[in-house]
């Protein structure tokens, strides 16, 4: 039975949480990941949320080992429940990982994936994500982001403006981030902006690579 809809920050008694957007965006994200991920190695997913994405990607990319993580204990329970149901051998147990922490419970990764965290977290979490990626990734290894952003070169969709307002009303530290500011923060951390893909529903996928 599929649990009821859930978004980060909400409570819930179900072990398996369900984020409806995952079913809508997972195939489009996987199509881009096929171009950007390495052929083998370990992918660290930061802020795995419900765990539905990592299960889908582990099935789509069986030659990669997937390490989910989330700072929320209930989120980790959900990740573990979805993973157990899938029964895939290439998904590790979820880690308690706070992107803002100076030390993460993992020492290296061949790629890092972060979906829909940047706008539903304080700016310090994004800075911590870039700093952590710079520590863990080898030269040229990818950090991949997905979500909605404010692009100064492209008119912002009305739906994204409304979403931004709703996020800031919920928590003033949340909100859609300016793409230029994202690029500057990544550069300062030692990551080079490499590519972007326009995605359905006014989202973007961003590719950064660890500077050599």
Image (cartoon, rainbow, N blue to C red):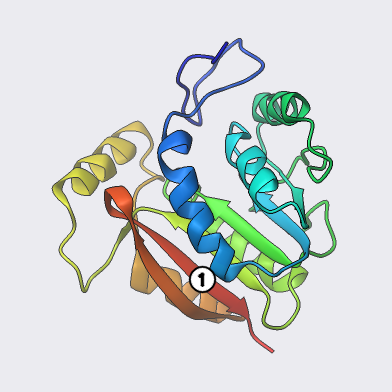
Q: Is residue 155 left or right of residue 123?
A: left
Q: Position of residue 149 (x, y in %)?
A: 33, 58
Tally the numbered discs.
Answer: 1
Tell me the quadrant of the picture where the C terminus can be found: bottom right
| Secondary element at tag 1 | strand
Q: Position of residue 85 (x, y in %)?
A: 73, 24
> Against 198, is 69 above or below?
above
Q: Position of residue 182 (x, y in %)?
A: 43, 69
Quadrant in the rendering for residue 87: top right
Q: Is residue 97 left or right of residue 180?
A: right
Name the residue located 24 percent from the left edge and 47 percent from the top edge: 160
> Against 209, is 10 above or below?
above
> Against 190, is 127 above or below?
above
Task: Tell me if residue 190 can be seen.
Answer: yes
> Against 19, is 15 above or below?
above
Name the residue located 21 percent from the left edge and 74 percent from the top edge: 153
Q: Position of residue 55 (x, y in %)?
A: 66, 38
Name the residue located 27 percent from the left edge and 67 percent from the top edge: 151
Would you name the residue on which mark 1 appears? 207
Graded by Cα atoms within 10 Å as few (under 14), some (14 to 19) or many (20 or more), the crowding at tag 1 reads many
Q: Is residue 6 left or right of residue 204?
A: right
Tell me the quadrant of the picture where the N terminus can be found: top right
């Amino acid at each position: 039975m599929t649990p009821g809809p859930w978004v980060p920050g909400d409570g819930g008694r179900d072990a398996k949480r369900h984020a409806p957007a995952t079913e809508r965006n997972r195939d489009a994200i996987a199509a881009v990941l096929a171009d950007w991920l390495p052929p083998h190695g370990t992918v660290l997913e930061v802020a795995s949320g419900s765990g539905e994405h990592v299960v889908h990607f582990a099935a789509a990319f069986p030659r990669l080992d997937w390490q989910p993580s989330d700072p929320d204990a209930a989120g980790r329970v959900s990740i573990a429940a979805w993973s157990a149901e899938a029964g895939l051998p290439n998904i590790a147990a979820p880690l308690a990982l706070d992107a803002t922490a100076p030390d993460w419970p993992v020492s290296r990764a061949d790629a890092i994936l972060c979906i829909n965290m940047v706008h539903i977290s304080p700016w310090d979490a994004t800075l911590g994500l870039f700093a952590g990626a710079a520590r863990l990734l080898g030269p040229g290894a990818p950090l991949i982001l997905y979500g909605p952003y404010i692009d100064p070169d492209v008119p912002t969709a009305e739906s994204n403006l409304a979403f931004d307002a709703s996020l800031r009303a919920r928590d003033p530290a949340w909100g859609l981030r300016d793409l230029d500011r994202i690029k500057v923060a990544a550069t300062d951390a030692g990551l080079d902006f490499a590519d972007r893909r326009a995605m359905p529903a006014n989202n973007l996928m961003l590719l950064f690579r660890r500077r050599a």
